[in-house]
Image (spheres, rainbow, N blue to C red):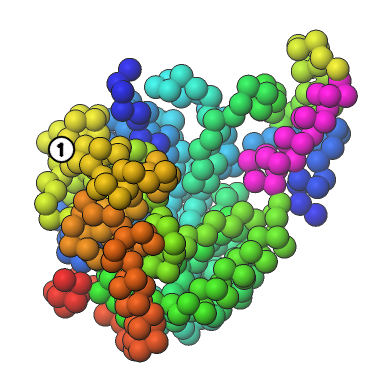
Amino acid sequence: MSDDMLLGEGSVPRFPRGARLQFNQQRQQWMVQAPERVFVPDEIALAVLQRVNGETSVAAIIDDLARTYNASRDVIRDDVLEMLRDLAGKGVIAL
Amino acid sequence: MSRISPPLAILAELTHRCPLRCPYCSNPVALVRSGEELSTEEWVGLLRQASELGVLQVHLSGGEPTARKDLERIVAAARDFGIYSNLITSAVLLDQSRVEALAAAGLDHVQISFQESEAANADRIGGYAGGHAKKRQVAGWVREAGLPLTANLVVHRQNLDHLGAMIEMASEMEARRIEVAHVQYYGWGLANRAALVPTRAQVAAADAVVNEARRRLAGRIVIDYVVPDYYAKRPKPCMGGWARQFLTVTPIGKVLPCHAADSIPELAFDNIRERRLADIWENSEAFNRFRGTDWMPELCRSCDRREIDWGGCRCQAFALAGDAAATDPACGLSPLHAKIAALADAESQAGGDRFTYRSYASMEAAGNCST
């Protein structure tokens, strides 16, 4: 079973070796680096990825975001799960 | 801030030395010998400049980059400068302790090339006995070291019918990414085109194999597919546009917009030994010659895909049209397209199976073939 299908609120996401979030001074941008890929996360993706550390669960990330942005937990939950599943499918996130 | 955005990635061709003799090698036909190569300090200095310029990734390639004994030091320098490092290797020179040493030095990713799924044909194509078995062994060590692996499957007429088995092989060795790359016809590949160019039927079958594998392996393996553009309707956006995102540094320090650019005789390229990287990227004549859209012929400039295809490939335009500023003949709108497609068709049917193998000794023969 692949990580994107297993991912749920109890999962603890991390960046696997070969993928990382990095701030680039010259571009003044956060960028995600992965095997032969570089992309710029949008504001929401960045907020999620900055909370990915291999220790915090998806549920805790959702709680934190709902608090920080004063938003409905249900809405945040769906967005976060969809985004992390997509990134797990691309190998940028592992469990 | 300068108006020219910085490059995303550098292809560092650390050496032209390689134990394999692949007849489609992307190196130029005129190979550089080891005594002329940049020193460790020069490569480290280049990476420092690249990091200051805003480069995010370095692809350590060759030739065979592990032929350099100082590879660990170059990898460590990339890590120290915050540059993501990718080793593009044939793998046959590696042993397990060196794989571990490279991982410890901070290497981020490994790409191993495979010539075939069957050992005998793989070793014939690569011109190196025992190579295939060694590659599979090294792929295991790479995974054991915790490094992500890409299997680079180079395909052409003499292995394309086995693409399904090649993808299966890559999946078994737990590659996280597969690159299915049709041979590109420059340098050695151009010299061997008649022995390599696939038939249309093979290409159609390969497209179906890739699409099926992508569906089946979704979420487990990312498959990137480099199409053969002689049969395409639109050219490939070579390098994402000339001097827009990438640059290549050759073993002797020449800085190129792409690894084949030296095949365009009208261009003079600067050397990192004589000029700063940022100055070359932003101000050199060769980088500015085909940058953007102003240089384009009317056919490209008036096309609504001008900033998608970027006019195709300058090296291919020179190789096929004799003019580096022409529309790439791979484009269906080029007046030369029908002729090129017919030539590929004819070669795919009538061409033999014999290769001119890449070697220092056969440089002259290959050079004569390609002109």
Q: Quadrant of the C terminus of chain B?
A: bottom left
Magenta-colored segment: predominant secondary structure:
helix
Q: Which residue lies at the image location 70% right of the left edge and 60% below the top edge?
A: B215
- Visible in this render: residue A51? yes
* Residue placed under numbered mark 1 in the picture: B285
Location of residue B131 in the rendering, given as x and y in whole percent from the top left corner: 44, 74
Q: Is residue A15 above or below residue B33?
A: above
Q: Between residues B133 and B325, which one lies in front from this camera angle?
A: B325
Q: Which residue lies at the image location 43% right of the left edge and 51% below the top edge?
A: B87
- Visible in this render: residue B253? no
Amino acid type, residue under disc 1 in the picture = Glu
Q: Quadrant of the N terminus of chain B?
A: top left
- What range of the chain is rendered magenta? A73-95
* Horizontal relation, residue A78 to residue B57: left or right: right
* Horizontal relation, residue A2 to residue B44: left or right: right
* Horizontal relation, residue A71 to residue B85: left or right: right
Location of residue B122 in the rendering, given as x and y in whole percent from the top left corner: 46, 78
Location of residue B89 in the rendering, given as x and y in whole percent from the top left corner: 42, 59
* Horizontal relation, residue B3 to residue B38: left or right: right
Location of residue B35 in the rendering, given as x and y in whole percent from the top left corner: 15, 56
**SS at mark 1?**
helix
In the image, is residue A77 part of the stretch drawn in magenta?
Answer: yes
Q: Which residue lies at the image location 56% right of the left edge and 49% below the top edge?
A: B147
In the image, is residue B64 part of the stretch drawn in magenta?
Answer: no
In this rendering, the count of numbered labels is 1
Q: Between residues B186 and B106, which one lies in front from this camera angle?
A: B186
Q: Judge the density around disc 1: few (<14), some (14-19), many (≥20) Cα neighbours within 10 Å.
A: some
The chain under label 1 reads B
Q: Is residue A90 above or below residue B82?
A: below
